[in-house]
Amino acid sequence: MNSYLYFNEKILDNQPLEFIEYGPLYNPIKSQKIELIGNTRFELITQYQKGAVSDSVDFPVGEIRQNNDTVMLKGKYVDLKVKLIGISPYHRFESYNHEEQTCIFTEKSEFRQLYIYYSDQHLNDIQIEYISNTDADYHLPDLFKMKTTQIINYTVNQLRINQTMLDIEHNSATALEMIIHDIKLYFIRLKKNESINDAVIIYEKVQSEEVRRKIRDCLSFCLGRQLQYIGYLIIDNENRPIECFYQINESNINFDSDSYVALMPAPLYHPNRNIIDKDKINKLTNALFNAYDKYNLKNVLWIYFNALYAPRHFAAAHFGACIESFQSAYLAAHPDDFPYKLIEKHEWRKLQNKLIQVLNDTNICDPELSILKNKINQLNNTPKSELTKRFFEHININLNTIESSAWKERNNAAHGKHSEKIVIQIKNIYILRCLFHRMVLKATKGSDFYFDYFSIGCPVKEVRTSIGEED
C-alpha cells in the first residue's frame, strides 16, 4: 500500500499526455509540465507559439468568485486521465528559440486540485487517505510493522507512486483500528520525513468524500487536533492504482506550527498509560458521527478548529461561537422542548392588539412610533438568554460563577472592547473550550468524563461537574 506521499520535482511531464480541454489556457500547447512548489502550491507551465488563442472569460475587475476552471489531459500511450481543477494563469512571458528560429510563449498557472484516473473501480478496492498535522503526545494501540521493501514503483510520466506493504506484526504501536458506522478503517501514524503527509487512514472499502470528511472531523475532535486532508489513492487488490486525488492547503493556517497544544476533550487512553483506548475512542467517534448531521457538526467543528488557531485576544469569541452554533442546532433538533414563543399565539394576539392601541393613542410620531411597534411585535419571542438557560438545563449542565462570567465576556473582543487583563483572557479560553467539550460529550453521549484544562493538573471530571469544582 502507498503509505507515504511523495512528489518528484516534476509531477507530470509533457510527452505522454495530450490536452482534452484547455480551459482558460492559450492553445494549441506545444509542451507542458506540472510541479509542486514547496509542498504548498501546484503549478502548470505550458508553452505555445504565436497565433495561439484563449477561451478565458474576462470577469469584471474586482469580482469575487470561486474558480472552478478545469483543464483535462489524457495519456497518449496509457489509459490515463488527468484533471487540474481551479486553474488560474498568472504570468506569461516570451522567449526566442534560436534553433527553431521561432518565438516561444510560456504561461504559468496555479491550480488547487489534481485528479488522476487510471481505471474503473472494483468492489474490493482499498482507499488510502493522506493526512498530516497528527503530532501529539499519545501512542496508538495496534501493532503494525511497515516493511521498507518496495514492492511497486509505479511511474506515470514522473508521477511516482511508491507502494509499500503494511503487515500487522508485533513490532511498534503505530496504528489504530476503528469501526465507525460499520466502516472499518486504520489510522496509521508515520515517521517524520520529507513526505507531505505524516499519517494515513486506510479504508477497507472505498468511501465517499462526505463520509470521509465526517470521519476526519470526528476523529480530529477526539484527538484535539484538526487533521489536514491532502488527498487519497485507490488501489486494487494487486496494488495497482485506480485513481488518486491531491489538493493543496488553501487555508492560511500553518498546520506545521506549534500554535496550540493538542488537548483531547475526554480521557480516551488507558489509565496511567499514554496509549489510546480503542473502546473509548470508538465510542466517542461513533457518537459524533451519528450526531453529525443532527447537530450540524460540519459547521460547528469548522468554527471549533478555527478557534484553536485564533489569536489569544479573540479566541474566546470563537469558542463562544462554537457554543452558540451547537446550541442553535440542538434547539432545532428538539423543537418541542424549546418553544420560541412565551405565550400561545391566540393569547398573544389579544395582548399585542391592546399594546398597539395604547401606542396609537399617544402623540408619538414616526419614525419612533414604527420602532416601538416593532419592539412590541418582538415581545413574545423567547429571549436568547432564556433559551441558553433552558438549553444547559436540558443537557443537565449547570454553569457556575466562573463559567457564567466567561460566557458573558466571550464577545468583548468581537465588540471592540479592549482589555488589559491578559490572564483573564487566557483563563476564559480554557473555560469556554472545556464548556464546549462538555456540551458535545453530554449531548452526543460520547463520554461521561472530560478534562478540566482550567484547573491545575487538568483533572478528569464527570461531565455534569462544572469547571474548577470538585466531583
Image: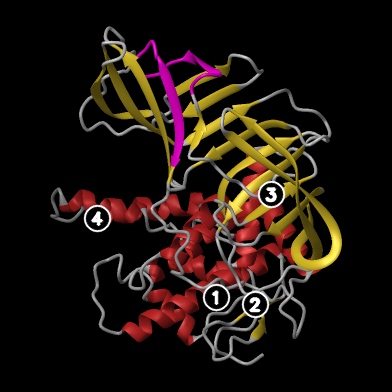
Mark pair 4, 1: CA separation: 41 Å
Q: Which mark is residue 3?
A: 3
Question: Residue 16 location, x and y as percent?
Answer: 56, 19
Dot 4 or dot 2: first in sequence order is 4
Question: Residue 55 location, x and y as percent?
Answer: 34, 13
Would you say residue 293 is visible in this rendering? Answer: no
- Residue where numbered disc 1 is placed: 434
Q: Amino acid at mark 4?
A: Leu
At 38% from the left edge and 58% from the top edge, which residue is drawn?
379
Dot 4 or dot 1: first in sequence order is 4
Mark pair 3, 1: CA separation: 35 Å
Q: Amino acid at mark 1?
A: Cys
Q: Quadrant of the C terminus?
A: bottom right
Residue toward you, 471 or 58? 58
Q: Which mark is residue 27?
A: none
Does the magenta-highlighted stretch encompass residue 214?
Answer: no
Q: Quadrant of residue 363?
A: bottom left
Q: Residues within 10 Å of mark 3 (few under 14, many from 20)?
A: many
Q: Amino acid at mark 2?
A: Tyr
Vertical comparison of 98 with 385: above or below: above
At 64% from the left edge and 41% from the top edge, which residue is drawn?
232
